Every structure is written in C-alpha cells, then in structure tokens.
Amino acid sequence: MGTETGIRRLASRPAVIVLADGTVFHGASFGARCVRTGEVCFNTSMTGYQEILTDPSYAGQLVVMTYTQIGNVGVNATDDESSRPWLSGFVVRELFEEPSNWRSESSLDTWLADQGIPGLAEIDTRALVRRIRDQGFQNAALSTDPEQQNIDALLEAARAAPELGAVNLVGRVTCSQPYQWSEPTWPGVEGQVPAAETPSKKLHVVAYDFGVKRNILRQLVDHGFDVTVVPATTSAAQVDDIAPDAVFLSNGPGDPAAVEGVPETVRELVERYPTFGICLGHQILGRALGGTTTKLKFGHHGGNQPGKDMHTGQVAICAENHGYAVDADSLRAAGEPVEITHVNLNDQTVEGIAHLERPVFSVQYHPEASPGPHDASYFFRRFRRMVERHAAGETVTGASIAREG
C-alpha cells in the first residue's frame, strides 16, 4: 500500500469476488460499498488507469489490472475519456491511497466512491488473470458491502447475470442528443511539447457515438474537422440533413451483433460518405459489409498489442480494448470488394479493413491511445487525406489510401 496506515485501514474493509465457475478471491475494498456483477476482463496497460476507468467500452465489465500498483497518480478531470466511469467494478493488486502527482485532484479511492464504483484490492491478480486467460471470459459478482458477502448468494448472482452479448450496451452509453465538439488534444506543459499544426481548411465529420472516447474527438479536431457527435440511433436520412463531408464510427462496448439496426444504417452511409471506423465501429462496418463477428476467448485489452500493416509490413504496438473480432472468412464469402489491411500478430485476427471501390476503411485498435502508445496515430492523417481528396472530386478508396502508407 501507499502507507502502513493504508494497509491497516483497507484490512478492515473486507471485499470478495466470486466467479461463475465458483472461484473465490477475498481482499480489501475501496471505492463504493455495493454489489456488482459483470464480465471479468483484464487489462495489461502499465499506465492510464483513469482513461481505462472512463472508457465507455468497458460498460458491463469488471476490469482487472495486471500492473501491480494502481492509484499512485490519483485522478483529474482533464484525463477523463467520458462523463463518468461505465465499468461495473475495478480490481487491483495494490492500491495507492496517497497519490503523488501535481495534476492530481483526488485519490482513486475517493473518486470511485463518489462515482458509485466498487474496487477490490489485495488479491492475487496474477491468479485471477490466469483463470480468465485459460478458461476464457466469464461473469462474476463483486461485493464491497460487508453485509452482502455470502459466497453462495454471490455465486448465484454471478451465474444469473446476463451474458455481455445479450445486452445492447451501446444504448446505455450513447449520447441522447447531437452535440458539437471543438476541444483539441491537451497541449501539455507550455514549452515542453511542440505545438501541432492543424489544417487550415475545415471539413465536417459526423461522429457516431457508440461509446466514443474524448481523445478520438480531440484527434479529429486536431486534424481539421468540425465534429458533430450523434446518437447511435441516428438514421442515414438524418445524416443527410446534416450534410457532412465524412462519417466516423466510434468505439463502444459489448457485442456488435447486439446493436440492432446500426449495420443497416452504416451500409447506406458508406455508399454516400467517406467513412472511418475504430474498434466497435470497425466491427459494425464489417457487419455492414456482409461479414460476421465472433467472440474472442479473453479479448485484447492493453497497450502492448502488435498490429501489422499488411501493405507496408510495419508493426505498430497498439492500444486495444475489444472482446470481439471481425471474421475474415465471412468477409471474403460476402463478396464485397474489401481487403484485410491489418492483423494482430498474436492471434492473426483482423485488425483493419479497407474498401477497394469506396473511400471506406477501419481499424480494430485505438490510434488515439489514451492510454497507450501513439504508433498508430497515422490513421487520423489517412482519414483527413482521404476526405480531402474525396471533397476535391478525386477518385479515392480506403484501399488506395492504405497502400500509400
């Protein structure tokens, strides 16, 4: 712990997590006192726990951090990736209760309590992660309420919790009304980071909010876009009324098959607008183009995934957060003129696709990072270049842009 006092205090706050297979881990609680169920996943990032906590893509999940020491830099409003944390619970090995960072505005413990999110510390996270790695995704019940820690009752709650694929989680996290976004990326401390150059000519993009991270919107602004964010249920006709230069499909939580009606809308949009998708947006685009998606055993969650560009041969170390993947064979069988542009080198799953006849492409991982490496940030430059050329009347496709590197 951060201090001996912290160790003694947490030891007096018992907590427990019970997996649906009956595995039990006892530890100490922090954050809110309550019981929550969700699908257990683990994240291998060494930094950026606040960005992970506020990423809407984790809705419905209990997130386990593999890095051992969490809370050391506290939390601050600037680093939030959405309006609040959407995950069901947070599990760590060692909690630092006394943060040491000049940007910190609150401790992680206090902030999670205010947000109503339970936390579990002082367990063997290595054993829990190995369980999920070997057995695959499963639900669990997490209790930080000392009066609700009956193991049998928690086991029943874990087994009764709905599977992630049975719930349209996008409906929980999407915005209710369209809005404009104009904030660029944080410039850092003045004089320490060179100022980025933003294109002078503005282009207008409609960004579908399936659970969008703020740094995606900031990156779009940095690359010269006026950004209109719209709810996931926005129809193609409503987009036509806005008359943008392009469409963006965001990240988000859960199973793309549960987001009913959206692939059909996207199918209409790609026939009229240059389109770029990230993460869930990539999966929805794949389904719109006739493919299917499958659930991975334990998903990709972290900042150290290797993604290979099939055209350049370049490998980027990527930030990823997804439990589903586009099936390559289904895309080929659909007969749509689409090529696979990127693959994950760990398991060869599809990480990027591009249309051979339309200005459309997508990527499974997160080029906006937050947290994670910036190796893949070039995707936003590709998108800007593609939209510029299309707006100028040039014939451009997602595949031709991908081949340019």
Image: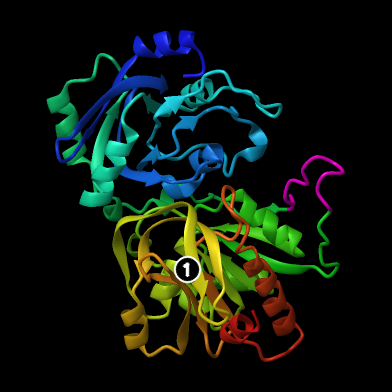
Quadrant for the C terminus, please.
bottom right
* 80 versus 375 height, above or below: above
* Crowd rating for badge 1 (residues with CA inside 10 Å; few <14, some 14–19, many 20+): many
The amino acid type of the residue labelled 1 equals: His
- Expressed as whole percent of the image width and height from the top left, the position of residue 30 reads 42, 21
- Expressed as whole percent of the image width and height from the top left, the position of residue 2 reads 51, 18
**Which residue was labeled with disc 1?**
282
Residue, x 71% and y 77% (percent of image)? 385
- Expressed as whole percent of the image width and height from the top left, the position of residue 140 reads 25, 37
- Expressed as whole percent of the image width and height from the top left, the position of residue 268 reads 50, 79
Circle 1 — which element? helix
* 295 versus 141 height, above or below: below
Magenta segment: 182-194
- Let me know if residue 191 is in the magenta part: yes
Q: Quadrant of residue 239?
A: bottom right
- Let me know if residue 64 is in the magenta part: no
Q: Residue furthest left?
A: 152
Residue, x 40% and y 31% (percent of image)? 92
Residue, x 61% and y 61% (percent of image)? 375
Q: Please give left or right for residue 194 compared with residue 15 in the image.
A: right
Q: Please give left or right for residue 80 compared with residue 14 in the image.
A: right
Task: Name the magenta segment's main secondary structure.
Answer: loop
Q: Is residue 243 visible?
A: no
Q: Please give left or right for residue 379 compared with residue 71 in the image.
A: right
Q: Please give left or right for residue 60 compared with residue 402 in the image.
A: left
